[in-house]
Image (cartoon, rainbow, N blue to C red):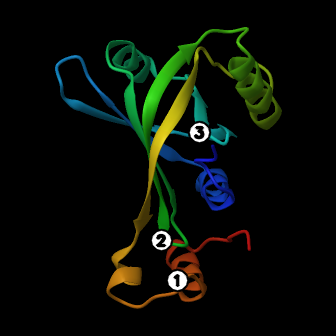
Amino acid sequence: MTVIDDDMRRVVADAKLSFVATVRPDGAPNLSPKGSVSVYDDEHLAFMDMASPGTVENLRHDPRVEVNSIDFFRRRGYRFRGTAEILPPGDPVHTWLADWLLAANGPGYPFHHAVLIHVDEVHPILSPAYTFGGATEEALVPEWKARYNAEYPE
């Protein structure tokens, strides 16, 4: 069953930084930015624990997780809800992420566990500019490129 479609894959890849929400053992929320969130397959996201001891510890107590990936230029994204599994070195998901990290960042880049998230629900996130302002992506991208003074992959 395909849960993660091509648009979701593009948003996750283009976001470069996603936000992972977990629940601390005392019930308080924890939100942590992750630069390694990637689509693993049609039903899973994955990220590498590079400097995430709190996130990993929270997931050991409560595997529920939410990941928000936002395309800041298009002013939209996705909220992925699911259940996380912590995977050790040697696991195929860990190896896949480690290979990507080493290719992207070079040798010596620290990483520990891989986290595989089975996605149970996906919900779109849209700027009010779409809902109330009648905006289009074609209009928003140049506006937000200018605001960030940034280049954007077309």
> With 34 as the anchor, is 108 left or right in this view?
right
Rendered view: 120 above or below 9? above
Q: Are marks 1 and 2 in contact (CB under 8 Å)?
A: yes
> Looking at this view, is 138 or 148 the one in front?
138
Mark 3 and mark 1 lie on one chain; the one further toward the N terminus is 3
Residue corresponding to mark 2: 75
Q: Secondary structure at mark 1?
A: helix
Three-letter code, disc 2: Arg
Give the residue at x 56% y 81%.
Answer: 137
Q: Amino acid at mark 3?
A: Val
Determine the secondary structure under disc 2: loop
Using the rendered view, name the quadrant where residue 125 is placed.
Answer: bottom left
Residue at image location 60% in from the left, 56% down from the top: 8
- Label 1 amino acid? Leu
Name the residue located 62 percent from the left edge and 9 percent from the top edge: 88
| Residue assigned mark 1 | 140
Dot 2 crowding, Cα within 10 Å, few <14, some 14–19, many 20+? some
Image coordinates of residue 91 in percent, x first then y, are 70, 12
The image quadrant where one finds the N terminus is top right
Residue that badge 3 annotates: 37
- The front one of 44 and 106 is 44
Query: Which picture quadrant has residue 123?
Result: bottom left
Q: Earlier in the sequence, mark 3 or mark 2?
A: 3
Residue 128 point in image, percent of width and height:
34, 77
Q: Mark 1 or mark 2, which has the lower sequence index? A: 2
> Where does residue 103 sit, x and y in percent of width and height?
82, 33
The Cα–Cα distance between marks 3 and 2, rounded to whole angstroms, is 19 Å
Element under label 3? loop
Disc 3/disc 1 C-alpha distance (Å) = 25 Å
